[in-house]
Image: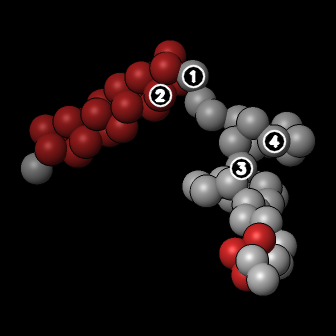
């Protein structure tokens, strides 16, 4: 008897079994990645805050 051929076939390797509910690019419209311009603006605002705080000391 060929025992190797018996049983359920193996699934593809490296594939997730399910989609995460909060994965990027999913159905949830509130879960979007920020654009490069938005990130740069945020970084510049934070840099201004820290440089203003350091100048007062």
Kindly state the secondary structure of the residue where label 1 is placed: loop
Q: How far across and down, in percent of the image, does residue 24 sit?
A: 69, 42
Foreground disc of the pair 1, 4: 4
Query: In the rendered view, would you say 30 is above or below 48?
Result: below
For image coordinates 59% across by 30% down, the residue present is 34
Kindly state the secondary structure of the residue where label 4 is placed: loop
Q: Are marks 3 and 4 in contact (CB under 8 Å)?
A: yes
Give the residue number, with chain letter if any, for mark 4.
26
Foreground disc of the pair 1, 3: 3
Q: CA distance from mark 3 to mark 4?
A: 6 Å
Give the residue number, with chain letter if any, for mark 3.
23
For image coordinates 57% across by 22% down, the residue present is 35
Q: How far across and down, in percent of the image, does residue 57 sit?
A: 10, 50
Q: Are marks 2 and 4 in contact (CB under 8 Å)?
A: no
Q: How far across and down, in percent of the image, does residue 32 sit?
A: 71, 36
- Foreground of the two, 3 or 27: 3
Q: Are marks 2 and 1 in contact (CB under 8 Å)?
A: yes
Q: For this view, does 40 lie left or right of residue 56?
A: right
Q: CA distance from mark 2 to mark 4?
A: 21 Å
Earlier residue among tags 2 and 4: 4
For image coordinates 68% across by 54% down, the residue present is 12
Earlier residue among tags 1 and 4: 4
Q: Quadrant of residue 40?
A: top left
Q: CA distance from mark 1 to mark 4?
A: 17 Å
Residue 35 is marked as 1
Q: CA distance from mark 2 to mark 3?
A: 20 Å
Give the residue number, with chain letter if any, for mark 2.
39
Q: Are marks 1 and 4 in contact (CB under 8 Å)?
A: no
Q: CA distance from mark 1 to mark 3?
A: 17 Å
């Amino acid at each position: 008897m060929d025992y190797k051929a018996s049983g359920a076939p193996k699934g593809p390797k490296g594939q997730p079994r399910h989609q995460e509910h909060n994965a990027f690019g999913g159905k949830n419209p509130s879960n979007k990645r920020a654009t490069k311009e938005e990130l740069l603006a945020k970084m510049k605002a934070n840099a201004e805050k820290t440089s203003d705080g350091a100048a007062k000391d």
